[in-house]
Image (cartoon, rainbow, N blue to C red):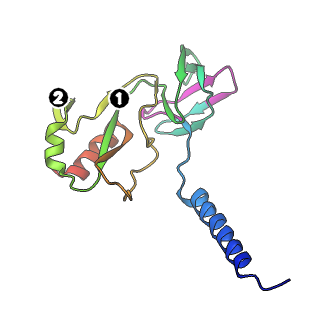
Amino acid sequence: MKNNPSLKGLLIAVAAFIIAFGVYFLFLSKKNYYIVDNPTPNTYYYKINNGSEGIISAGQTVHVDLTMGKNSIKVFDQNKKMLYDSAFEVNKIRGLLNIAHQDYYINRQYYGYNLKKDSLLLALDKTVIDGKEYFGGAKHSNKLYTEDFYYNVDEDYDKLIKNVQQVEFRSKIFRKQDYLNYYKEYYKF
């Protein structure tokens, strides 16, 4: 075979393309999944879509399989006495099942050039938690199923968002105490 520089260039470009996608899918891509979360000291049993029985202990987070559209869940206490049987609709690629109906807060963290955090906080709504006002407009949720967020309770915000030409936000769902800890650490009031 003749020494063909065009063919060598094409092979190098294809190899670089494959390596770039491999790095992205192995290290950089965000996984989409659904979880059941239990921030209480209690243990719960549950059945999703009449499947096998799951157990979630105090403070635990468990990944579960859900289908787009209607889903059902049966929740039992630690003595396997049924607490409720409910249905919910899945429309997005990540979500949180709050089987204990505890308080969660969905917070928006803003990124971008010329971001003025103090004036932005003052422009957003205030959230009242245990009688105290918190800036930033975190949205309260204690519904059975929530999917209006980008980062789940077991994920952290990205430390750096690249190529943000304007002010954008990423939302994360927090357990109540985790949100209070995050707020105290991030805003340092």
Note whether residue 83 is visible: no
User: What residue appears at the point 63 percent right and 65 percent down from the top-left corner?
Assistant: 17
Q: Residue furthest right?
A: 1
Of residues 10 and 90, the one drawn nearer to the viewer in this rendering: 10
User: In the figure, residue 170 lies in which quadrant?
Assistant: top left
User: In the figure, residue 70 lies in which quadrant?
Assistant: top right
In the image, what residue type sits under mark 1? Asp
User: What residue appears at the point 25 percent right and 56 percent down from the top-left corner?
Assistant: 113
**Residue 152 painted magenta:** no
Span shown in magenta = 35-54
**Residue 49 painted magenta:** yes
Q: Which residue is mark 1?
A: 103
Helix or strand or loop: what does disc 2 sit on? loop
Side of 52 relative to 108 (left or right): right
Side of 13 relative to 173 (left or right): right
- Lower position in the chain sequence, tag 1 or tag 2: 1
Side of 188 relative to 5 (left or right): left
User: What residue appears at the point 46 percent right and 45 percent down from the top-left corner?
Assistant: 154
Q: Which residue is mark 2?
A: 131
In the image, what residue type sits under mark 2? Gly
Q: Position of residue 3 (x, y in %)?
A: 78, 86
